[in-house]
Image: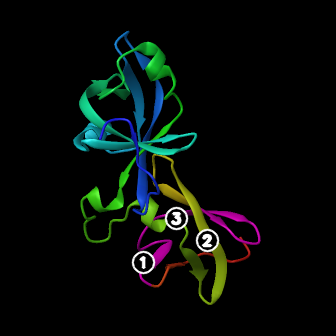
Amino acid sequence: MTGTDAGPVAERLVVLGRISGIFGVCGWLRVYSHTQPRDNILQYPRWLVRQRDGWQEFVLLDGRAQGKGVVACLDGITSRDEARLLMGADVAVPREELPAPGEGEYYWADLEGLRVYSGDVCLGRVSHLVETGANDVMVVRGERERLIPFVPGSYVIRVDLDADRIEVDWDPDF
């Protein structure tokens, strides 16, 4: 399906990147990819792009790593003007298309929204995660915002996706 409305998206989507600009004159797009390595986003042949009126599905025709990002050609986008309309849009794929994470590994999308506990005290829910270089950091929002390093075995004691819960070794007063 090229450039067709994906309609009500019942599938759980995972945002893998964002269209950050245009490349050339034939409708190619610059894409900031959240995948590791960056060009892994090109392994997904079907991209859902967030438009004003919802998600729109595009077929990836071609792409490659370019500098610190990725450039891509989507079916149906053939000019700079058409490409410009997609600037700033998120690129997502259905969660089911992602490979299963390894033992003790998690997709950020699976951690977001989980409740975070220090002992019996609920600190809040994971709003999002931030990559710092040294380690990932959970932004936990409850009665206040806390930044908790996502370091299993040190600060993160246990992640239980089924129970919607992350147990941490963190002083609730901090």
- The label on residue 161 is 1
Label 1, label 3: how far apart the Cα atoms are: 10 Å
Residue 173 percent coordinates (x, y): 74, 75
Please give left or right for residue 143 compared with residue 89 in the image.
right
Q: Position of residue 112 (x, y in %)?
A: 52, 64
Q: Residue at x 76, y 72 (%)?
A: 143
- The boundaries of the magenta stretch are 139-162
Q: Which residue is mark 3?
A: 112
Looking at the image, residue 24 lies above or below residue 121 = above
**Residue 26 within the magenta-colored segment of the rendering:** no
Q: Are marks 2 and 3 in contact (CB under 8 Å)?
A: no
- The image's mark for residue 125 is 2
- C-alpha span from label 2 to label 3: 8 Å
Q: In the rendered view, does 91 fall on the left or right side of 39?
A: right
Instruction: Indicate the secondary structure of the residue bearing disc 1.
Output: loop
Mark 3: amino acid: Glu
| Nearer-the-camera pick, 110 or 59 | 59
